[in-house]
Image (cartoon, rainbow, N blue to C red):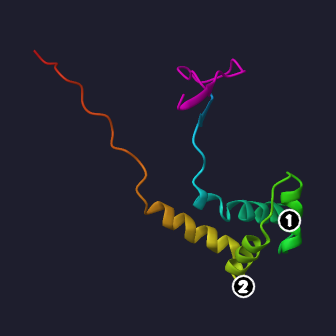
Amino acid sequence: GVLDTQAPTSTARPPGLKHTRVQLACPTPRYLNVNMKYAAAYLLAQLGGNASPAEADVKAVLASVSAEVDDAKLSAFFAAIDGKDVAELIKEGTAKLATMGGGGGGGGGGGGGGG
């Protein structure tokens, strides 16, 4: 099917919630994956206490989860963030996301009614 759903394993859930996980059965668009794993690994290295991770540090984080590393893409990622404050880049990116449309309209009103 289009959606892969799984019933929750815990009985503690909000009333009316039937499923805890919905996974789309389509691949993630390629443009979303280009630098995301490098950014995530970089930020994880920072959270681990390394204020300024190097390429080798990011490779180590990715190797810990058996992720493949494309050296050209990793180098491009580092070139893109060179000399920039990562917290400021995140702030700018968040502001850009806020300007994007992303939701559908609300449901229509009920029909009929009134007497």
5 drawn magenta: yes
| Range of residues picked out in magenta | 1-19
- Residue 83 got which mark? 2
Mark 2 Cα within 10 Å, few/some/many (few <14, many 20+)? few
Q: What element carries label 1?
A: helix
**Mark 1 or 2, nearer chain start:** 1
14 drawn magenta: yes
Mark 1 Cα within 10 Å, few/some/many (few <14, many 20+)? some
Q: Is residue 9 left or right of residue 59?
A: left
Q: Position of residue 32 (x, y in %)?
A: 60, 58
Q: Position of residue 65 (x, y in %)?
A: 85, 51
Q: Which of 113 and 34 is in front in this view?
A: 34
Tag 1: amino acid: Lys
Image quarter of residue 67: bottom right
Dominant SS of magenta comes to loop
Tag 2: amino acid: Gly
Residue ID at (24%, 30%): 109
The quarter of the rendered structure image containing the C terminus is top left
Q: Position of residue 26 (x, y in %)?
A: 57, 42
Residues tagged 1 and 2 counted as in contact (Cβ below 8 A): no
Q: Which of 47 and 30 is in front in this view?
A: 30
Q: Where is residue 100 in the image (x, y as percent from the top left)?
A: 43, 60
Residue ID at (58%, 61%): 31
- Residue 59 got which mark? 1
Residue ID at (37%, 44%): 104
Q: Nearer the viewer, residue 33 or 83?
A: 33
How far is disc 1 from disc 2 in space, using C-alphas?
20 Å
Q: Which of 82 and 72 is in front in this view?
A: 72
The quarter of the rendered structure image containing the N terminus is top right
- Residue 40 got which mark? none
Image quarter of residue 12: top right
Please tell me whether residue 94 is drawn above or below residue 78 in the rendered image: above
